[in-house]
Image (cartoon, rainbow, N blue to C red):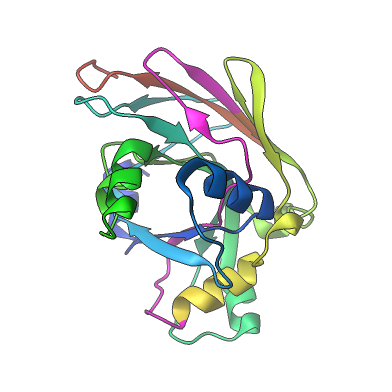
Amino acid sequence: MPDKERNLLMDKIVCVGKNYADHVKEMAAMLGDASSEKPVLFLKPPSVLREAKAVGEVLPLRLPPDGGLVHHECEIVLRLSRGGFHMSLEEARDAIQAVTLGLDMTRRDLQAAAKQKGQPWTTGKVFLDAAAVGPWVLVEEFPNYLETPFRFFLGGKLRQEGRGAEMLTSPSECVAYASSFFPLCAGDLIFTGTPSGVGPVVGGDTAQLEWGPMHFSTRWVNGTEAT
């Protein structure tokens, strides 16, 4: 299904922050972030999403044309088969239809500046190609996805590694928690947070994302270049 058609079926991308203890410490050192007892939630629109359709695909991603410090954040992504408001944990678990790896790309310079001023940091999270996902795997075909390590390699070097079982808030809890604030819809994506190891990417960088039965690659180009 073409990206434009698939995105019409999706209401929003929900992102969960501060969901791995090592990344919480990393961001405290990087930006002076305070710890949080609850997950941090923010949204991205479907218009910034790029999707690799097949295992092994190389997905080109554009960087902002005005430059800036862009960081990679590799994480497990959930796709919902149904939505709801104030969902129970059982309803949330049953709503998780498929999983993949994704990238929550971040303009760290804009995010840091907004945080220092106490302002919303949407511009640090929403920009061209600010979200990317790989091929989807049905949960029923990947029952041990929480125990299976996922890895992100930048230029052939391991930068991030984690397991869903290490999340401070589990996937089902992430879905239920988000639904306690706003309705979730069938087709919505949930980015579940990143482990430590985030860092910058520049034009010409390539990365490999590997997790269980799926893998795909990304290639960053400057925003003025064709993909």
Residue at 25% from the left image edge and 29% from the top image edge? 64
Q: In screen coordinates, is 140 left or right of 215?
A: right
Looking at the image, can residue 19 be seen?
yes
The image quadrant where one finds the N terminus is top left
Q: Main secondary structure of the magenta part?
A: loop
Residue at 51% from the left image edge and 60% from the top image edge? 34
Q: Camera-side residue: 130 or 49?
A: 130
Q: Position of residue 209 (x, y in %)?
A: 60, 31
Instruction: Report which quarter residue 185 is drawn in.
Output: bottom left
Q: Position of residue 193 (x, y in %)?
A: 56, 53
The image quadrant where one finds the C terminus is top left
Looking at the image, can residue 101 be seen?
no
Q: Per the image, is 74 magenta?
A: no
Write the start and end of the magenta stretch as one range: 180-208
Q: Camera-side residue: 53 or 227?
A: 227
Residue at 59% from the left image edge and 72% from the top image edge? 37
* Residue 181 to residue 8: above or below: below
Q: Position of residue 167 (x, y in %)?
A: 68, 59
Q: Position of residue 115 (x, y in %)?
A: 33, 53
Residue at 55% from the left image edge and 44% from the top image edge? 29
Instruction: Report which quarter residue 59 is drawn in.
Output: top left
Q: Camera-side residue: 173 or 56?
A: 173
Q: How many marks?
A: 0
Instruction: Report which quarter residue 182 is drawn in.
Output: bottom left
Residue found at the very far top of the displayed protein: 204
